[in-house]
Image: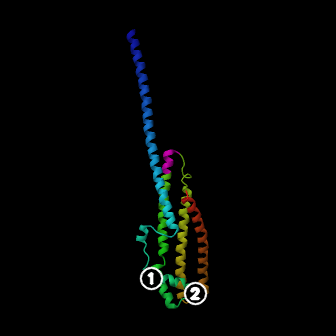
Amino acid sequence: MQENHKTGWITKKNIFVALLGAVLTYMLVTSVVDTRMQAVEQNIRDRLSDQEVLLAAIAETTARNGADAVTERVVQDCSLTERSSFDTLLGRLDKGLSYSELTELERLFGRCGSFYSERKAMMVSRLSRETEIYESYVEQLSTVTGEDHAEEFRVAEWKALATNEQERSELLASLVNLQDQIIATLLNGASATSPEMTPILYEVREAQDTLIVVTKQISDLRTSLVAL
C-alpha cells in the first residue's frame, strides 16, 4: 500500500518536473528567438540608416547635375578646347551662325552634345537602383516586425523622387535631340522662322515648360526628404 502511494507520488512529481522543464525550455527558447529577432531588426534598421544617407547623397548630386566617381569614369566629356568651342557656338546659335560655324557645331555636337544628358541618365539609374534596395530593406523590416514601415521610411516619396528624376532625365535627352535637329535643319538651308523649324521649336517649348514643373517637384521632394 505504501509502495503504491510512493509510486503515485513519484509519478506526480515527475509530471510536475517535466511540465516545469517544458515551460522553462519554452521561455528560454522564446527569449533566445526574441533576442535574435531584435538583433535582426536592429541590423536591418542600421542598413536602412546607411542606405538613407546614400540616397540623400545621390539625390543631392543628381539634382545639381553632378556625378559620382564611377559615372565620371564611364561617361567622359570631350576635351576642354572642344567643350569651350561647342558652348560658344551653341550660345550664339540664336543670333545666327555661318555655314562653316554650323558645320563645326554639328561636328562638336557629336562629341560634346550628349555628355551632360548621358551623365544625368546614369546617375538617375543609380538613384532608382538604390531606391529599390532601400524599399527591399523596408519590406524586410516589415516582415520581421509584422508591421508596415513603408510610411515611416517614406518609401513612396523616395520612389516619387526617383520617378521624377527619370522624367527630367528623359526631358533633357529630348532637348539634346531637338538641338541636334535644329542644327541639321539650319544646315539644310532653313532659318529660325522657316516652316520646317516651327514644330521643332514647339517641342522645345513644351519640353522646357514640363522641365520647369518637374524640376520644382524634384526640389520640393528632395528638400523634404533630405531635411529628415
Residue 95 badge: 2
Disc 1 marks a residue whose amino acid type is: Glu
Place of residue 113 in the rendered image (x, y in percent of width and height, measured from the top left): 48, 78
Helix, strand or loop under label 1: helix
Q: CA distance from mark 2 to mark 1?
A: 21 Å
Place of residue 143 in the rendered image (x, y in percent of width and height, measured from the top left): 49, 47
Q: Quadrant of the N terminus?
A: top left
- Looking at the rendering, the stretch of residues picked out in magenta corresponds to 139-146
Q: Between residues 174 and 33, which one lies in front from this camera angle? A: 33
User: Which residue sits at x=48%, y=58%?
Assistant: 53
Q: Which residue is outermost to the top? A: 1
- Asked if residue 32 lies in the magenta stretch, the reply is no
Q: Which residue is outermost to the left? A: 3
Write down the residue under mark 1. 82
> CB atoms at circles 2 and 1 under 8 Å apart?
no
Place of residue 63 in the rendered image (x, y in percent of width and height, measured from the top left): 53, 67
Residue 178 badge: none
User: Which residue sits at x=52%, y=81%?
Assistant: 180
Looking at the image, how many numbered discs can be counted on the residues? 2
Using the image, determine if residue 27 lies above or below residue 134: above
